[in-house]
Image (tube, coloured by chain):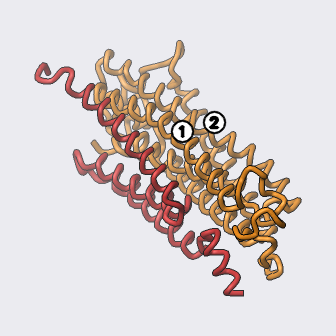
Chain colours: A orange, B red
Amino acid sequence: MSDSTAIAHGEHATPDHGHEAHPAYLRHHFENVEQQADAAGFAMWLFLLTEVMFFGGLFTAYLIYRNWYYPAFVAASHQLSIPLGGFNTLLLITSSFTMAMGVWCAETRRKSGLVLCLVLTFILGLGFLGVKTVEYGEKIEKHHVPGFHYSVQSFVNPDSDAESKAAGDKPLALDMARHTEVYFSLYFAMTGMHALHMIIGIAILGFMIVRAQAGAYTTGHVTFVENFGLYWHFVDIVWIFLFPLLYLISRHS
Amino acid sequence: MTDQKEMEAASHHVVSPVIYIVIFLALLVGTALTVWASYVDLGIFNPILAIAIACGKATLVVLFFMHVKYSSKLTKLTVFAGLFTFLTLVGMTLADYMSRAWGRW
């Protein structure tokens, strides 16, 4: 960790060097390392913008339906557990922090630090999915998954349901209660897409841990770690908006 | 040692761990704040406050964890253009849906 030789400059890009000695990771169609890194970062951001538009569509649908079927959305959101959602927010924010530290370790060529950060991010990501599984399990048990087996029982008769009772919900008319299914459709679509992004991220993390142990990202070429960091932080941002919108905003109204 | 670090910072914009820790703590405070606020009945301001805090947290992540504050103008412009397009699309969609039944409630 503390070996200062690891920080020493290798053949770091000075643009003047031109086509003489250049680091092995510089592709020939780039002028220099900085241009290569800029191009990769720009491309990563363009990809993230398409992701913003994708999740943005889901968020917009949520806002519109919440506006239309407001009582159903309020009652349905009371089914979610704020402690579980809050704990997951904690896990995800911490994983973003460990990822940021991982990028720093790669930049300053701390190999064991990088591996540690990636492993922590990996574990925190898995922890998030574990909590999500518990939450999904509860929804399945209570027949709150949209489809043939969906039940409006908790909403037409709130006293029969622990969560609805605790929130002091009033019974909904059947036609409004049926619209809670729209809430859960959006809930599963949004958290499901988010979880899919987490699963993809965790898979890439596993790959990166192996590569990092072989010393792949601590030679000065940090583009892969850096761009994966951007992806991971983006997934964190999506959750930063999902958590208040799905769990929090209807708690007391 | 310090010189080397400064050189790294100049060419690669290495963000120091101190900043990461400060931002991490700020995000934790934001999370605690938004959970606490959800239990207080603020009427119409509940969603507004929750979204405002979420926007603040997201801004911190984008600027510092994602290094946009230290990035090239191209990156900054890209992020801003994306945000602008996103808000325009959402704004226009919502304006359409909200005004369809205007006066017919």
Looking at the picture, how far across and down is residue A234, in whole percent?
55, 49
Q: What's the distance in space between the residues labelled 2 and 1, CA to CA?
A: 13 Å
**Of B100 and A142, the residue lying toward us:** B100
* Amino acid at the residue labelled 2: Leu
Q: Are marks 2 and 1 on the same chain?
A: yes
Position of B14 with respect to A161 (left or right) is right
Give above or below for A245 relative to A160. Answer: below
Quadrant occupied by the C terminus of chain A = top left
Q: Looking at the image, can residue A115 be seen?
A: no
The residue that appears at 32% across and 15% down in the rendered structure is A175
| Residue to which mark 1 is pinned | A51
Tell which of A6 and A27 is nearer to you: A27
Residue A186 rendering spot, x and y as whole percentages: 46, 29
What residue did someone put label 2 on? A196
Q: Is residue A162 left or right of residue A177?
A: right
Q: In the rendered structure, the residue with mark 2 lies on which chain?
A: A
- Disc on the earlier residue, 2 or 1: 1
Residue at 73% x, 68% y: name it.
Answer: A13
Nearer to the camera, A61 or B66: B66
Which mark is nearer the camera, 2 or 1?
1
- Above or below, comparing residue B83 to residue B104 in the picture: below
Give the residue displayed 84% in from the left and 59% down from the top.
Answer: A24
Q: Is residue A194 above or below residue A151?
A: below
Q: Who's the residue at 78% across and 76% down the image?
A: A9
Camera sees residue A215 = yes
* Residue type, label 1: Glu
Q: Which type of secondary structure does the marked residue at label 1 adopt?
A: helix
